[in-house]
């Protein structure tokens, strides 16, 4: 084999490797762009139900949120592994009536005038909210942090399984861009599953918890 042929083979190999790498990167970029566009279409939704069930630090967390433009009700239950202790609380907020309450059903107490930062609610977008309104260069940055994207099923729904370099894994519904499941390696390997409904009248589902026998604590 002469030097010219060796050189041509090496050039061909380099071009082939570059093409493969480019195609893999381009595929990730295109999929993230599709997810971003789907999420942007859902950003106008302000009437929805969202639920997350997660296992964190050997505790089971169940959070349900009913959210409208001006009213929010979130129920939170935390069950410890030994099942000897639990937390059962609700958060109710009504911006029209200027009401914001944190309700502990365990201690039968109500905290009023709650700081917004203490409010726990489940977002319609969760992890994929970071994909909304991405510029071209931000999409390139996210693509760089993605280790692999495959197609799979989650809850009998066609999904993208996105694996990030840090170990986080997201199962994202293809049609909507919503996260259906997440494993967050940076958060004690927390495993979370999500459920959504944004095609129902959530306002009919919001019922203010009965706190007539609860004590009031001003904050």
Image (tube, helix red, strand yellow):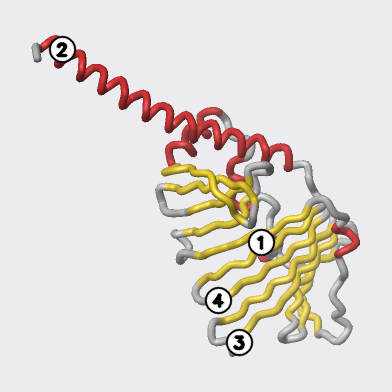
Q: Could you tell me how far apart the alpha carbons at marks 1 and 4 are, in whole angstroms?
A: 23 Å
In front: mark 1 or mark 3?
Answer: 3
x, y (%) of residue 108? 77, 85
Please rate how many residues cluster around mark 1, counting C-alpha atoms within 10 Å: few if below 14, some from 14 to 19, many from 20.
Answer: few
Residue 40 pos. (x, y %)? 69, 38
User: Outermost residue, bottom direction?
Assistant: 84
Q: Which mark is residue 85?
A: 3
Label 2: which residue? 5
Q: Which residue is mark 4?
A: 59
The image shows residue 200, relative to residue 3, as above or below, that is below
Q: Earlier in the sequence, mark 2 or mark 1?
A: 2
Q: Is residue 106 above or below residue 118?
A: below
Task: Give the number of the disc on residue 117.
Answer: 1
CA–CA distance in space, label 2 to label 3: 74 Å
**Residue farthest to the left, as pictured:** 2
Q: Marks 2 and 4: which is nearer the front?
A: 2
Which mark is in front, 1 or 4? 4
Sequence-wise, the earlier of marks 1 and 4 is: 4
The numbered mark, 2 or 4, whose residue comes first in the sequence reads: 2
Dot placed on the residue nearer the N-terminal end, 1 or 3: 3
- In space, the residues marked 2 and 1 are separated at their CA atoms by 67 Å
Q: Quadrant of residue 215?
A: bottom right
Q: Determine the image quadrant of residue 44.
A: top right
């Amino acid at each position: 084999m002469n030097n010219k042929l060796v050189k041509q083979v090496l050039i061909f190999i380099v071009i082939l490797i570059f093409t493969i790498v480019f195609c893999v990167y381009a595929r990730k970029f295109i999929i993230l762009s599709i997810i971003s566009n789907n999420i942007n279409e859902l950003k106008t939704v302000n009437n929805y139900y969202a639920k997350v069930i997660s296992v964190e630090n050997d505790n089971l967390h169940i959070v349900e949120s009913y959210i409208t433009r001006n009213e929010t009700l979130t129920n939170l239950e935390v069950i410890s592994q030994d099942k000897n202790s639990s937390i059962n609380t609700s958060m109710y907020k009504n911006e029209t009536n200027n009401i914001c309450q944190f309700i502990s059903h365990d201690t039968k107490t109500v905290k009023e005038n709650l700081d917004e930062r203490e409010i726990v609610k489940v977002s319609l977008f969760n992890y994929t909210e970071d994909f909304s309104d991405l510029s071209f260069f931000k999409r390139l940055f996210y693509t760089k942090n993605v280790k692999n994207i495959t197609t799979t099923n989650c809850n009998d729904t066609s999904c993208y399984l996105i694996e990030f370099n840090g170990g986080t894994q997201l199962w994202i519904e293809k049609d909507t861009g919503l996260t259906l499941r997440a494993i967050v390696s940076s958060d004690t390997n927390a495993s979370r599953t999500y459920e959504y409904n944004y095609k129902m009248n959530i306002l009919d589902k919001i019922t203010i918890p009965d706190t007539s026998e609860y004590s009031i604590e001003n904050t």
